[in-house]
Image (cartoon, rainbow, N blue to C red):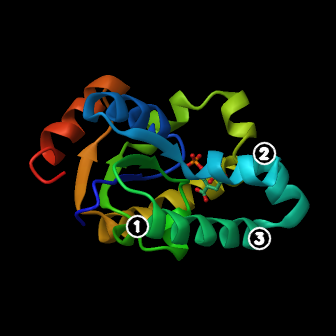
Amino acid sequence: MTNGNLVLIGFMGSGKSTVARELAKISGRYFLDTDMLIEASEGRLVAQIFAQSGEEYFRELERKTALWLGSSVCNAVIATGGGFVLSNDPRLIGTVVYLHAPLELINSRLLAQERSKRPLFADEAQAKQLYTQRDGVYRDRADFVIDATDSADCVARLVWEKLAPFA
Ligand code: S3P
């Protein structure tokens, strides 16, 4: 992809949005986040969309967002929701980076308040199952896999070191 977009994918709590903000600063790009775009256009939070309209409706909004990003956006750093790759090919939007963090780290990072924003993290056993299922999907859909265990600014620098020659 040569449109200058850098797309971050990965599991809930892997730091996509925080790293994307840092990466946007380093690379001189705008920062976008698919959950935030959806919340802004719906006028309600992701948790409310799930509760009031269901997961399939949310996935439809993700598909609409993916089409818009792929057709109309360039030179942005785009953080995606953890399930975005299930029904969209992020490579149609830009160069794709999978931020990989161990589940134990994600568990320790996500405070109760953060978990309550994520309906699919409400049940820890279910989250573990999803994590295992999705790891392969993230790897399949990524151009690069980056270890996201370090702090957000270190991870952003790692990503930029890898991507700068191609971006
Ligand atoms: C989801 C991840 C969330 C959000 C929604 C569904 C998922 O985004 O899009 O709750 O299916 O993994 P984050 O990855 O930013 O938590």
Q: In which quarter of the image is residue 111?
A: top right
Q: Residue at x 84, y 50 (%)?
A: 48
Q: Nearer the viewer, residue 67 or 90?
A: 67
- Vertical placement of residue 149 versus 139, above or below: above
Question: In this orientation, does residue 105 appear?
Answer: yes
Q: Which of 24 and 140 is in front in this view?
A: 24
In this view, which residue lies farthest toward the left?
A: 165
Q: How far apart are marks 1 and 3 (CA)?
A: 19 Å
Specify which label sits upstream in the sequence, 3 or 2. 2
Specify which label sits upstream in the sequence, 1 or 2. 2
Would you name the residue on which mark 1 appears?
A: 90
Would you name the residue on which mark 2 appears?
A: 45
- Element on which disc 2 rests: loop
Q: Nearer the viewer, residue 70 or 142?
A: 70
Q: Position of residue 130 (x, y in %)?
A: 55, 61
- Vertical placement of residue 1 versus 148, above or below: below
Q: How far apart are marks 3 and 2 (CA)?
A: 13 Å
Q: Position of residue 162 (x, y in %)?
A: 14, 45
Specify which label sits upstream in the sequence, 1 or 3. 3
Label 2 amino acid?
Leu
- Element on which disc 1 rests: helix
